[in-house]
Amino acid sequence: MSHDEFKERRRHVRVELAAVARVNWGDVTETYHTSNISAGGVFLLADSLPEAEHEIELDLFLPQVHAPVRAKGEVVWFRRQEPSGFAVKFTKISQAAAELIRLIVQRHGRSISEQT
């Protein structure tokens, strides 16, 4: 699926947000920075990319949140040009974690609109 096709299917509001994500797949553990996030997924900046449709586990270390947000997800698309990285769709996330992300997205979206 191309980036544009996936973008048209988004159901969640997505905002730019810099955070850290620790990602595990197979025997590999990597640390990435986020580019944007929504209650449905996240885009991770990366030079080395996991395989498409690869299931991953991730811990998101979000600003002003004391404990990492844990989720499982699926790599749904890649971007190889700058900024390179990959999109992850959450496949398993607790209701509390999804609600926390929604609140962060909502608060972050408001603070951006107040700046303009």
Image: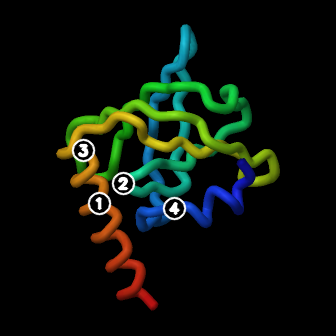
Gap in Å between the C-alphas at discs 3 and 1? 9 Å
User: Residue at position x 72%, y 30% from top?
Assistant: 48
Binning the other alpha carbons within 10 Å of mark 2 as few (below 14), some (14 to 19) or many (20 upward) gives many
Q: How is the image coloured?
A: rainbow
Q: Secondary structure at mark 2?
A: loop
Percent position of residue 33, x then y:
53, 43
Percent position of residue 58, x then y:
42, 30
- The answer to which image quadrant residue 78 occupies is top right
Indicate whether 40 appears above or below 23: below
Left or right of 86? Residue 81 is right
Q: Secondary structure at mark 3?
A: helix
Left or right of 60? Residue 76 is right
Q: Are marks 2 and 3 in contact (CB under 8 Å)?
A: no
| Quadrant the C terminus occupies | bottom left
Gap in Å between the C-alphas at discs 2 and 3? 9 Å
The image shows a total of numbered marks equal to: 4
Tell me the mark number nearer the camera, choosing from 4 and 2: 4
Determine which of the numbered discs, if any, sits on residue 39 in the image: 2
Residue ID for mark 1: 102
User: Residue at position x 29%, y 60% from top?
Assistant: 102
Residue ID for mark 4: 10
Residue ID for mark 3: 97
Percent position of residue 110, x then y:
33, 79
- Nearer to me, 56 or 8: 8
Q: Secondary structure at mark 1?
A: helix
Tell me the mark number nearer the camera, choosing from 3 and 4: 4
Gap in Å between the C-alphas at discs 1 and 4? 14 Å
Q: Secondary structure at mark 4?
A: loop
- Disc 3 marks a residue whose amino acid type is Ala
Q: Are marks 3 and 1 in contact (CB under 8 Å)?
A: no
Tell me which numbered mark, 3 or 1, is placed earlier along the sequence: 3
